[in-house]
Image (cartoon, helix red, strand yellow):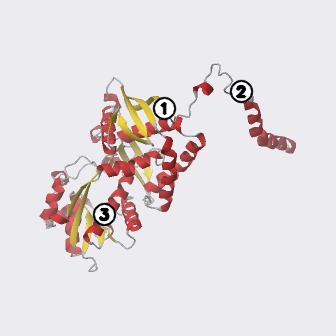
Amino acid sequence: MSEIKKVVLAYSGGLDTSVILKWLQDTYRCDVVTFTADLGQGEELEPARAKALKFGIKPEQIYIDDLREEFVRDFVFPMFRANTVYEGEYLLGTSIARPLIAKRLIEIVNETGADAICHGATGKGNDQVRFELGAYALKPDIKVIAPWREWDLLSREKLINYAETHGIPIDMKHRQGGSPYSMDANLLHISYEGRHLEDPNAEAEEDMWRWTVSPEKAPDQAEYITLDYVKGDVVAINGQAMKAHEVLAELNRLGGKHGIGRLDLVENRYVGMKSRGCYETPGGTILLKAHRAIESITLDREVAHLKDDLMPRYASLIYNGYWWAPERIALQTLIDHTQQTVNGFVRLKLYKGNVIVVGRDSKNDSLFDSTIATFEDDAGAYDQKDAGGFIKLNALRMRIAAKLAARRR
């Protein structure tokens, strides 16, 4: 412990990381730098600065960084270019934020001359893996302090008692038995875990959801929107150009209004256990549907199928914390190459929890040829007789096998 003179703490200002800050000072006797990331979680972040100052952290060692644009532009959008879904449903809202936090932690280590980083991820979760894999990939010799794997404060009650003993301010919600859910939020999603949700057979309470109305209470009138694409990324909504984080924020608003993007999932965690969580990802749900729509007319068939084959592997890499690994980077290079022709627009109808594609076009990159696809007279553009030989060639191996099976009988 004496080797560590300065540590950069991923700090939210909540109960857990406030206890960690004090614990670091008492246990490691080290200088602490706090880092709070604004990823669009929608919370006031300045209280984190006030709490850090209260613990004696020097003003120049308190980092509160607006990372919203970098988060969406360099992490969320690249992920959606791959149409990424984990285990068939999860849009990886928590997973995709961790490599950016790890990156910024290491940058601050380099800026301040710190020896170590510290995070508040529990020993049961995936985030400890994601933070630390990212940190080691970017700074191989970095030291990592993971309090949940060191201390004996392994319950909410023990954390509260420690906080009260050391004069750490406690929100009333913790004194009254704790907040009902463990939550993580950023511009892509909100996740909910714990308490009532630990029973996988218990329906989520309606008042838990924060971004979305229930589909039953969504407007009775559908809303139409148009998304403009350049190289696989949305650059405008309804003709209005936007930055990446503005796109996602607006799609969250629209999706939430129409009850889009709720998910109740039991997932397989990296550490081996199954975990039930609920998620709100309204903007991401819209992005996924729209991106597949624009790709449907701009991607070659085999390229599209190759992307679909690779997507589960890509999703697992992100979920398991390998964003900075060479295989993820290699896959991203391939994916981004496929997106050079993914340009055009998609029209969507939002209605009571549904995202419905009602149109798509690409002026210069569409592979859809109506003169060939038509059911009317195609003026010789397609020769139906060609299909016969193609079918016979592809059936040949099955015909041979069937004849052999008949002889064996």
Q: Position of residue 106 (x, y in %)?
A: 32, 65
Which residue bears the numbered disc 2? 384
Q: Position of residue 99 (x, y in %)?
A: 37, 58
Q: Amino acid at mark 2?
A: Gln
Residue sticking out furthest to the right: 407
- For the residue carrying disc 2, how many other residues have a C-alpha within 10 Å: few (<14), some (14-19), or many (20+)? few
CB under 8 Å between callouts 3 and 2?
no
Mark 3 or 1 closer to N-term?
3
Residue at image point 40% right, 35% down: 228
For the residue pair 57 and 267, the one nearer the viewer reads as 57
Per the image, label 3 sits on a secondary structure element best described as: helix
Which residue bears the numbered disc 1? 363
Q: Quadrant of residue 376?
A: top right
Which residue bears the numbered disc 3? 105
Q: Position of residue 176 (x, y in %)?
A: 18, 51
Q: CA distance from mark 3 to mark 2?
A: 61 Å
Q: Amino acid at mark 3?
A: Leu
Residue sticking out furthest to the front: 364
Q: CA distance from mark 2 to mark 1?
A: 28 Å
- For the residue carrying disc 3, how many other residues have a C-alpha within 10 Å: few (<14), some (14-19), or many (20+)? many
In the picture, the quarter occupied by the C terminus is: top right
